[in-house]
Image (cartoon, grey):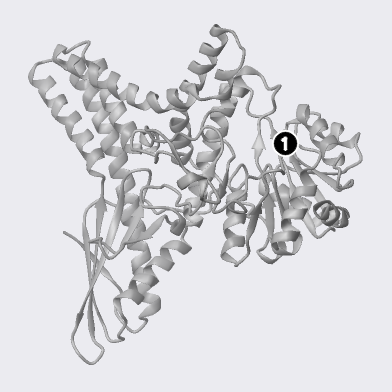
């Protein structure tokens, strides 16, 4: 009773913003569900972001405020709704989702009771979705929430989130560079960095339709990959050198692949523990293969070698390795698909098999689409990488009359690279490098700084910049080169040409990424000398 009264008392202060872009077939249900909340009828704001379908006409038939703009992207549409909201709380949902009737009641109560700056809940696929959409719902890459406890969140998906308007305005609203995705992750991290807390209510449910076709799903994943590239450049400290996000909490949602192993529930002797803790098998290397760029390099090399076997029979030995690699990549997805909800429903055996196969295939191809998006970020990306330099080690020597610690000099270079939106990372005490900058999915460059003290505040600053290529990727390129040479020796010219082109393309990609990283670090290191030490001579980089 206390929960209901707290929510009803503030329901009039809630505005529901629905950004819309070419999802007219879902919009009517979304608006009607938002208007039909048991906590009272909120102010519903539909922001038509330049739709070319009948979305604006559908919204105009309902009791909502319709704002039509040119296409500026998702984050801009959210900001437009924020400016028109007059209540204390602004809730956001997608145009292809419809909330439960008690959605706002639980969101408002969670924020009021816990003093949170924002709150969200789970998003579940509707039961009447088509078979392809249901398979997509069980595939990886969907909108999931990240929880640090049973009540607090690190990330709230954009289809189900609400914030205090004052908190959003204090951090400047949503970043308009995120036009397709990533705006929800960015705003959650900015609020957390500002010292605010985010809440989670498992009862604040939104029914969120998944993509109805494989093509639409892969296009969505490419957009998510491009958004990850933007997030990595804006938040390099929240990403690792391998390009993986560092979540403090735990991800919850369908499509997540766990490790191979049995799960156990530890509940104490005679059930004495107050809560049962579920310790699932950790995410193992086999489950994480699809997200590793090196793995895709290896798959491409094995595929090229297997195809070249048509002209040079010794390469038939690569076919079993290719089959084993495909099996290793598909096994986690097949296991996750076998646990999908539709496998326990009363469907025909043929239908269950078809949906299991499709879900397994989606697990297999999703990492390719995500990586493709990261390799080809959107044209509005704010960072401007320099032109690639020759990927060779460089050493800088400079005398300085103004003493500075090595930590301060490294921090200055790091700030310069971060301001340039470069994916740069600091080394730990165990690393033999100080800064690592990624030039792409695989290759990068590393910087190491050394100081010689010569008394009177005089220092000799030594900076070494060297390209860095993962050992696995270098081994793949070397193996292709060796096989191409052996094919030439055997006069198998078509096989040699195929292997040479494959190895050359992969090697060129590594060299291009390494050259960008070297030039980026060089550009970041040189202005540091001019700004922090104006009385000293600039850095002089010499190739080794």
Quadrant of image for the C terminus = bottom left
Mark 1 lies on residue: 21
Residue 511 horizontal side relative to residue 247, left or right = left
Residue at 57% x, 35% y is 142
Q: Secondary structure at mark 1?
A: loop
Residue ranking furthest to the front:
270
Residue ranking furthest to the left:
489
- Percent across and percent down for residue 20 are 74, 38
Instruction: Look at the picture and state if 314 lies above or below 377.
Output: above
Q: Along the line of sight, which residue is nearer the eye, 415 or 120? A: 120
Task: Give the quarter of the image for residue 158.
Answer: top right
Instruction: Look at the picture and state if 345 lies above or below 152.
Output: above
Residue at 39% x, 66% y is 414
- Percent across and percent down for residue 383 are 49, 54
Residue 85 horizontal side relative to residue 372, left or right = right
Task: Give the quarter of the image for residue 284.
Answer: top left
Q: Along the line of sight, which residue is nearer the eye, 447 or 316? A: 316
- Percent across and percent down for residue 460 are 21, 79
Residue at 23% x, 17% y is 320
Q: Along the line of sight, which residue is nearer the eye, 493 or 206? A: 206
């Amino acid at each position: 009773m206390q929960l209901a009264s707290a929510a009803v008392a503030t329901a009039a202060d809630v505005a529901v913003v629905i950004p819309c872009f070419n999802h007219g077939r879902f919009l009517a249900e979304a608006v009607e569900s938002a208007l039909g909340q048991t906590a009272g009828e909120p102010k519903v704001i539909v922001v038509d972001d330049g739709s070319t379908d009948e979305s604006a006409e559908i919204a105009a038939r309902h009791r909502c405020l319709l704002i039509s703009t040119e296409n500026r992207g998702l984050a801009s549409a959210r900001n437009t709704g924020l400016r028109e909201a007059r209540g204390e709380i602004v809730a956001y949902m997608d145009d292809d989702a419809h909330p439960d009737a008690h959605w706002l009641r639980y969101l408002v109560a969670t924020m009021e009771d816990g003093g949170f700056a924002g709150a969200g809940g789970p998003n579940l696929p509707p039961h009447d979705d088509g078979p392809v959409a249901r398979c997509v719902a069980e595939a990886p890459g969907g909108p999931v929430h990240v929880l640090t406890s049973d009540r607090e969140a690190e990330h709230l998906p954009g289809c189900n989130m609400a914030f205090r308007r004052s908190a959003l305005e204090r951090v400047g609203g949503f970043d308009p560079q995120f036009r397709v995705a990533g705006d929800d992750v960015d705003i959650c991290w900015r609020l957390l960095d500002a010292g605010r807390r985010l809440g989670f209510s498992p009862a604040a449910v939104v029914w969120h339709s998944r993509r109805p076709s494989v093509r639409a799903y892969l296009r969505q994943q490419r957009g998510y990959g491009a958004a990850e590239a933007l997030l990595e450049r804006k938040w390099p400290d929240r990403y690792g050198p391998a390009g993986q996000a560092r979540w403090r909490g735990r991800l919850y949602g369908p499509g997540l692949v766990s490790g191979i192993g049995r799960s156990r529930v530890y509940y104490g002797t005679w059930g004495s523990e107050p809560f049962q803790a579920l310790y699932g098998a950790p995410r193992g290397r086999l489950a994480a293969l699809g997200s590793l760029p090196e793995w895709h390099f290896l798959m491409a090399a094995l595929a090229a070698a297997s195809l070249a076997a048509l002209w040079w029979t010794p390469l038939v030995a690569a076919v079993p390795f290719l089959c084993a690699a495909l099996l290793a990549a598909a096994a986690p997805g097949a296991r996750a698909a076998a646990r999908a909800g539709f496998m326990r429903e009363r469907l025909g055996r043929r239908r269950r098999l078809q949906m299991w196969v499709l879900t397994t295939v989606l697990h297999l191809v999703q990492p390719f689409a995500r990586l493709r998006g990261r390799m080809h970020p959107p044209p509005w990306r704010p960072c401007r990488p320099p032109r690639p330099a020759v990927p060779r080690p460089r050493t800088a020597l400079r005398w300085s009359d103004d003493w500075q610690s090595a930590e301060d000099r490294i921090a200055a270079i790091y700030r310069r690279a971060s301001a340039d939106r470069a994916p740069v990372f600091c080394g730990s005490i165990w690393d033999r490098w100080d800064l690592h900058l990624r030039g792409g999915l695989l290759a990068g460059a590393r910087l190491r700084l050394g100081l010689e003290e010569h008394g009177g505040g005089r220092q000799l600053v030594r900076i070494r910049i060297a390209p860095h290529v993962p050992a696995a990727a270098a081994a793949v390129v070397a193996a292709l080169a060796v096989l191409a040479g052996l094919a030439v020796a055997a006069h198998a010219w078509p096989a040699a040409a195929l292997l040479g082109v494959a190895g050359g393309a992969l090697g060129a990609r590594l060299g291009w990424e390494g050259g960008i990283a070297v030039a980026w670090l060089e550009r970041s290191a040189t202005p540091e000398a001019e700004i922090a030490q104006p009385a000293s001579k600039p850095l002089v980089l010499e190739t080794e």
